[in-house]
Amino acid sequence: MQRKIFVLLGSIVLMLLVSSAALAGAVPASFESSPQMNAPQTLNTTFKINVVFVGYSAGDINLPAFQSQLPTTYDPIVRYPAFYGINLPVNIHGDYAFDYTFTPTSFNDAFFSYLTSIGKSKALTDYQAAYNDQVNKTLTVGPKSLYIDAPSTERWLMTHGRDDLGLDIANYTVFFVNWYGRSDFKFHVYTKTDVADPDTGYNFGKVRQTRKIIAWGGSYGRTWFYDLSAGPEAWTDNWNVDDADLDGNGVMEYRMPPVWEYGNTSGYRPFTDLSGDLGKVLRWVAIDLLFTSSPLYDPLASAPFPGKKKKVFVNMFEDDPSANGTKWIDMQLVHDNLGQFQRDYKWKVVLKDQQLTGGAKKAFRIFTGLNGSNDCWNAYGDPFAELFCYFDTNRNQYLPKIKPSGPYVGGIFAFNTTDNNLGNQFGLLGFADDNWVSGNPSYVFEFDSPGYRDLGYGFTTTTIHEFGHHIGMSHPHDGYDSTSATDFGPSDDLYFAWSGDESHTIMHYLDLADDFGWFDNDNMNRFLTGRYLTRANEIAAQMQSGETSREANALLEQAESRAIEARAAFQKMDYARAASEAKASFDQVWRAAKLAGLKVPMIEPLPQGGPRQGPKMVDPIRFPDN
Ligand SMILES: [Zn+2]
């Protein structure tokens, strides 16, 4: 079993032309057709999840109620193709095993004493004050609030969890924190203030009231804490205990109120199930969105051919006479943060500056609603398709030609424009568009203006964020729940999914990190491992047994041993190594196929899917005025 890394599909027979100079040799045993197995081996694993209750007593938590909410399975999908009904195999299957800890008083004493020692007493946040104005509130928050550094808190819990509780913190760990009810309790919020926007210098963590939060993780390890005795806060709107329906669609936005509200039945919903609510947070936020997420796009759709570079090619369009867009983008940081994230590729970034003129200008005016002309968008029935269809049609005018077996070129179109020229798209920072037919990534479009810069936004963080989507990453506030086969976002009964943003990642909307965090790295490396091994299998399946050269066979042997390494590293949760080995395995198979005269693309072209069922994923500015 262990040796059966590549399993040939018996039904596919593709004759290979073997170079006359090459000596024919036997295909390694493990590549021979295996009729009883007709699909690549799935990467099976069990994720051990540490659930740690800090400051809760065993009597506070109804464990069966908590457990009734938990997920049973992890079967990630590629989300965008799935919107069109297309299933792309990731070939990862996970189970979850939960381990529960209630921390002893000594741990709690030390922890809350630490929070007190690093916290700074300040005025209530706007949202704590807004909570105090709620009719159905249980108590009055204040008069002061302690501002506590979130990453430091994460690190304390992680290291003391390991040293004092004996937790294996190589596993994913959630700390559910409750300070309320202790004599040393202080109203508090968490902050992260060490990152300013690279273009504008604006420090969202310091300045914004909406960035005083109640959860954090992923800065230092596989740890996330969630503290319902903090806040209340803006990001999940849990300060509001009066109003059920926040967006006016007639459905309640489900939120977890501050912990002291549990028992209160006079709010917009009865707050009676703390255990169930924490279970929901573990499942729909910590597990589905942070620890074990699903990719938005196939990461192989943006992979270069073996030995070739990955290029980020930014076309900057100048549409504001009073400012130059190149001053608001730091290409070195784009290069470094993407390069840190996917280390097995050589990255190159290119910035090309030009005036917005001609067809591009017309397309942009149509996109923003300032020009009502018919154009290529009519084929899609939506002016929002205009940028995609214009730049796709005229791709070679703006981007380097696609070379066979060449580098990957990711095209970004950046519009340095004015508030007025953004028209009805004012407030849109960017989006990593798909191809409108099958859910593969196409181009990134992004926008900046004087008004956006006043709010703190240049192009750099948007570029990294959008390219993060382009290469596969989802937000930490929307994703896929395997147990129920549900693609979801932060709305209605899952509104609390906004909590996922309170983690270290460029993919969140908080603007508290400009790089990828621990969870991103794990997830991306798992996706790459699954996809590279799957693709290697697909290609191996096209190589017929007994017809390959000795040289090609040697490559296949190497590929097999690298795949074995990948699987072993995957089991040890060394996902970076797993991804490297899986890529190396793929590279060798691809080279073997090339030697055998077989020209294979990086990915099989997807069929045209059905009408898109999911949302168009776009990135608006959340809380523009706070
Ligand atoms: Zn986004």
Image (spheres, rainbow, N blue to C red):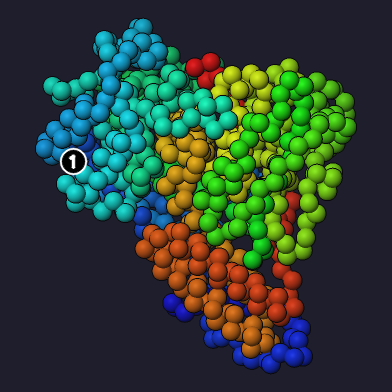
Residue designated by label 1:
102
Q: Is residue 273 above or below residue 30?
A: above
**Residue in front for this viewpoint, 387 or 605:** 387
Q: Is residue 174 left or right of residue 452?
A: left
Q: Is residue 612 left or right of residue 380?
A: left
Number of numbered discs overlaid on the protein picture: 1
Q: Residues within 10 Å of mark 1 (few under 14, many from 20)?
A: some
Percent from the top left, x then y, of residue 49? 31, 49
**Residue in front for this viewpoint, 97 or 353:** 353
**What residue do we see at 30% from left, 27% from top?**
148
**What residue do we see at 40% from left, 13% from top?**
126
Q: Is residue 270 above or below residue 76?
A: above
Q: Secondary structure at mark 1?
A: strand
Percent from the top left, x then y, of residue 395? 81, 46
Q: Residue furthest left?
A: 106
Percent from the top left, x then y, of residue 438? 70, 48
Quadrant where the N terminus lies?
A: bottom left
Percent from the top left, x then y, of residue 513? 47, 36
Q: Is residue 193 above or below residue 529?
A: above
**Residue in front for this viewpoint, 294 or 245:** 294
Res 279 seen here: no
**What residue do we see at 71% from left, 90% from top?**
22
Cβ of disc 1 within 8 Å of ligand 1? Answer: no
The amino acid marked with disc number 1 is: Phe
Res 561 seen here: yes
Q: Is residue 540 above or below residue 202?
A: below
**What residue do we see at 61% from left, 29% from top?**
458
